[in-house]
Amino acid sequence: MRPGGGRHKGAAFEREVAGLLLDELGIKFKREIEQYRQSDLGDLVPCDGTFPFTIECKRYADGYLAKDSWWDQACSAARAAGLLPSLIYRFDRRPIICRVPVAAFVVMSGAKDDYGWQYNADVTFEAYCMIAREILASGNPCIERNENVIGIAN
């Protein structure tokens, strides 16, 4: 890979995910350019309105499962933003996978969440969009920001 190629590959994946989210949810996202200068920022942010997740994107050639450090990075950004974390990743010749905390399923159902973010699940991109739609449709996408309600991954 040429120098800087990893950053280019990551940026291209972020743009791809932003386009897919626009197609699936009708919400326009932009890349958070400040992520290179400031820590605890997600990769994509909605251009207007609210979204229940921070979005961390990872694109790598080889692998099968997300690294723990990727999830930790997503949780740090979510903690700073007061939102739920999400990790969207893909390896070469594999479909996009999205990791969300179990808390997202609880919030989606309208119940009160008391699950830590160390409990998470990998879902398809389509399932991720369905979860986001359901949380948004609940009328309160800005979920409670109490650390006792939304668990913080250690």
Image (cartoon, rainbow, N blue to C red):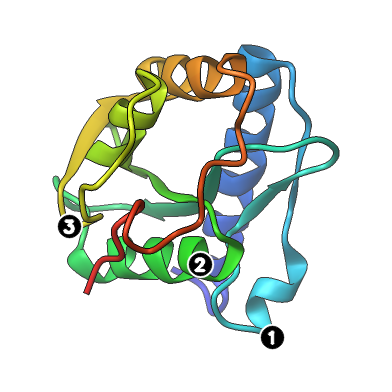
In primary-sequence order, the first of circles 1 and 2 is 1
- Residue contact between numbered discs 1 and 2, judged by CB atoms under 8 Å: no
Residue 41 percent coordinates (x, y): 60, 69
Front residue of 103 and 57: 103
Give the residue type that dot 2 points to.
Answer: Ala
Q: Residue at image x 68%, y 28%? A: 19
Q: Residue at image x 41%, y 51%? A: 59
Above or below, 2 relative to 56? below
Q: Residues within 10 Å of mark 2 (few under 14, many from 20)?
A: many
- Residue contact between numbered discs 1 and 3, judged by CB atoms under 8 Å: no
* Residue holding disc 1: 37
Residue 96 seen by the camera? no
Q: Residues within 10 Å of mark 1 (few under 14, many from 20)?
A: few
Quadrant in which residue 15 is drawn: top right
Q: Which circle marks residue 118 in the picture?
A: 3
Above or below, 10 relative to 101? below
Question: How far apart are the alpha carbons under marks 1 and 3?
Answer: 27 Å
Residue 7 seen by the camera? yes
Q: Residues within 10 Å of mark 3 (few under 14, many from 20)?
A: some
Give the residue type that dot 1 points to.
Answer: Arg
**Side of 24 where 117 appears, left or right:** left
Q: Residue at image x 30%, y 52%? A: 61
Q: Residue at image x 56%, y 39%? A: 52
Quarter holding the C terminus? Answer: bottom left
* Residue holding disc 2: 77
Give the residue type that dot 3 points to.
Answer: Gln
**Side of 76 where 30 appears, left or right:** right
In the rendered image, the residue lying farthest to the right is 48
Residue 119 percent coordinates (x, y): 15, 48
In primary-sequence order, the first of circles 1 and 3 is 1
